[in-house]
Image (cartoon, rainbow, N blue to C red):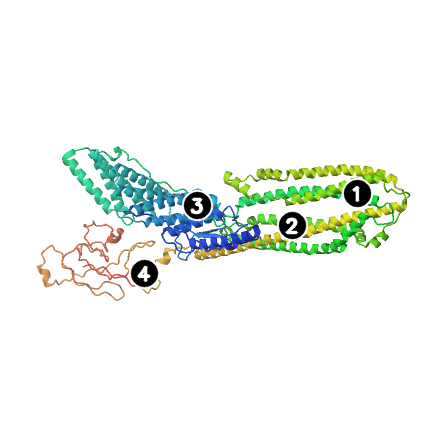
Amino acid sequence: MTNFISVQLKKASEVDLAKPLCKFIQQSYPGGEAQAEHCRAAEELSKLRKSALGRPLDKHESALETLLRYYDQLCSIEPKFPFSENQVCVTFTWKDAFDKGSLFGGSAKLALASLGYEKTCVLFNCGALASQIAAEQNLDNDEGLKAAAKHYQFASGAFQHIKDTVLSALNREPTVDISPDTAGTLSLIMLAQAQEVFFLKATRDKMKDGIIAKLANQAADYYGDAYKQCQYKDTLPKEVFPVLAAKHCIMQANAEYHQSILAKQQKKFGEEIGRLQHAADLMKTVASRYDEYINVKDLVDKINRALMAAKKDNDFIYHDRVPDLKDLESIGKASLVKSTPIVIPLSQKFTDLFEKMVPLQVQQSLSVYNQRKADLVNRSIAQMREATNLANGVLASLNLPAAIEDVSGDTVPQSILHKSKSVIEQGGVQTIDQLIKDLPELLQRNKEILDESLRLLDEEESTDNDLRTKFKERWQRTPSSELYQPLRTEGANYHNVLNKAVQADGQVKERYQSHRDTIALLCKPEPELNAAIPSANPAKTLQGSEVVNVLRTLLANLDEVKKEREKLENDLKSVNFDMTSKFLTALAQDGVINEEGISVTELDRLYGSYTQKVQESLKKQEELLKDIQNTHQDFSKMKQSNNESNLREEVLKNLAVANDNFVELLSNLKEGTKFYNELTEILLKFQNKCSDIVFARKTERDELLKDLQQSIAREPSAPSIPLPTYQTTAAGGSKPAASSTPTPAPRTMVGTKPQPPARPPPPVISAASSPSSASVPSGTPAAPAAVPAPTPGTGAPAASTAPSQAQGPPYPTYPGYPGYCQMPMPMGYNPYMYGQYNLPYAPSPVYPNPGQAPYPPPQQPGYPFPQQPYYPQQ
């Protein structure tokens, strides 16, 4: 009786997880031991998938453990890897568990680049394998009963989880086996079977009949609900529906049986008989409708014996009234089962292969935090550099400090010599020329990488559009134009970045050309530099002047401010704090990360004092420059004003400006070279991303084309059109198409007009009676004489001997059907209106009731209506 339903496993196509995961790890995580460890974990995950899905699984706990461990690993990597069609693109292909396929080998399957789809299908297999393990248990001992109940409840929980999450996990219509309706039905079936196991255990432990009745009634309720859910669907195997219907009746019968025992104990003998009668009726239904699916002989015998005994006792002893079924008190219900909730990890032996890898949400928060940090640091450094450039520009315009050093008017000021030496040490104009020469090559390399990446997307999108136009609604996959939108947006951003870089390069070159001659002069040796600077003898010496001393003090203070900025810039760059722990803690506590709130708070704590020092430095410089300008006005008044001194001062100013421009140009060109080199790495990653998704799309396209070709090949070329009747049925007397087989005996055929059977020749009545005919009593019909031999080709029957006894009218005897005598029909009755009992001809008063002749053999081709010989009336 204990027929349990188990679920078939889904079949998965082989997938290499290691390659795409390792590529993502190499692109997203810094090199070193951590990266190598993550790649080894990816290879282990790929091996685990092969163990769980790449081979047939035994119906054993160890096989289920492997499936559970793989499911746990999928749950652990889900927040750490961005599985999607345009990031980590891995296409998972699964077949429908209940689809048997066609004669041509096709079967319903779905391929998606979704980790949620993989998780759903793996969990389905976990529930299916658990149901198979439970069905294999020995229910004759407690260990088997406990194991079966545990696995059925787990399977119910797995299918319930699929029902609740499948639509959000896939974001599209799933295959039938994992659809919410099917998963909900399977969950209820597993729960019903778990309840039945508890009923069996209660029966085996001989618990009170009232409790057993409630357990059975609850199991019947579960089976009835499952039966209602799937009775109008054909998604499950065909044997599931009758088994559910039978189990519903069986459990209800068990409930009535045990409740009848309780009624007998309470001396309610009429109720006992009523319940047993109801149980017997239920079992008759099972035995008559579902006997090929489930054997209930033992239970039927037990109920019938109890019913006979109860009726006998009531008839002879108690005489209690048997109530109607509707008047019986309802049996209570007691549920001892519930779906096991899916709580990660499912396996007790689970160890996270990617334990040291931070979740993707944390990684994204870290990326945004690092961007915020870089913006803050760069903004502060830019403010200080801009202030320094402003100070240098002001000093250059005032020819300071060269003006207070050049009191003699004949030698090169010491500050100019320092600037010249610094420019020469850094390579001078040769270094600038080489850096400017390298920029176009770096730019061209980046443009080629970006153009090649977008070309791959364009080609694949063009192919996809052509196939979509060709197959129209058959081409059911995400359009490439939608899928590539994020990549195209990213590519457009890179184009904008390159365009801005080209503009910046142009500005740098233009500025260099305007100051190249002065920078070249600054690179000359001291004698040549001194000869290039006009000499000027002042009218009076300014050495020891109070104004000069004040200017020197102010310039020294300004230099001190600049040095403090250099140190402050290095301090800003060196601040480092790992925010991983902060974000992990927030994710664990709240389930989400408020990145902006956490980042702003931490950045203020780390950089608040530095930003305050930057503002103080800017304010101090502003005050110093104001004092320097005022003091320089006094200094200028004290200097002798002549053309030579003005010309010398102008050249010294230009040399000071050339030094500042050289320093800034060299910095800009080095930053530009670094920018192009870093952009090359970014664009190479972008190109790899584009090539990966194009390759994945090509693989998916080839598989879809193969499936479409198979489905098109299976379709009929044209609808079958039935031929007109006049082409299939020959007209009377005409010759139909030749056939190699004889025409069968006339029968009523579908689609053709019923034809009467061929008329046999009438009997020949001889005038000379045989000697035996004289002894026949009067009123008895004479037996017919031998029938003349048939004309060849007419298809008439062979002669037969007369029957041994008189018979009625000649009814035809079909092969396998015995002849019989009808009641005599009235004259005028049309025998051709009644199917296989037709009279071959109307009874004639001249030939009363001749004997039954053998039914003619099959007609020969070309003679559907043989002509009968003419017999004149006697």
Q: Amino acid at mark 2?
A: His
Q: Amino acid at mark 3?
A: Pro
Separation of marks 4 and 1 at Cα, in angstroms: 128 Å
On the image, the x and y values in percent for residue 256 come to: 25, 38
Which numbered disc flags the more N-terminal residue, 1 or 3?
A: 3
Element marked by disc 2: helix
Residue at 37% x, 54% y: name it.
58
Of marks 3 and 4, the one in the foreground:
3
Q: Would you say the residues marked 2 and 4 are in contact, meaning their CB atoms lie under 8 Å apart?
A: no
Residue at 54% x, 42% y: name it.
581
On the image, the x and y values in percent for residue 331 come to: 28, 35
Label 2 sits on residue: 495
Of marks 1 and 3, the one in the foreground:
1
Q: Amino acid at mark 1?
A: Leu
Label 4 sits on residue: 733
Find the residue positioned furthest to the right.
Answer: 539
Is residue 780 something one can see in this rendering? yes
For residue 395, which numbered disc appears in the image?
1
Element marked by disc 1: helix
For residue 345, which numbered disc appears in the image?
3
Q: Residues within 10 Å of mark 4 (few under 14, many from 20)?
A: few
- Position of residue 647 in the picture relative to residue 450 (left or right): right
Which quarter of the picture shows residue 333?
top left
Q: Would you say the residues marked 1 and 3 are in contact, meaning their CB atoms lie under 8 Å apart?
A: no
Which numbered disc flags the more N-terminal residue, 4 or 1?
A: 1
For residue 45, which numbered disc appears in the image?
none
Q: Nearer the viewer, residue 503 or 524?
A: 524
Separation of marks 1 and 2 at Cα, in angstroms: 40 Å
Which numbered disc flags the more N-terminal residue, 3 or 4?
A: 3
Separation of marks 3 and 4 at Cα, in angstroms: 84 Å
Q: Residues within 10 Å of mark 2 (few under 14, many from 20)?
A: some
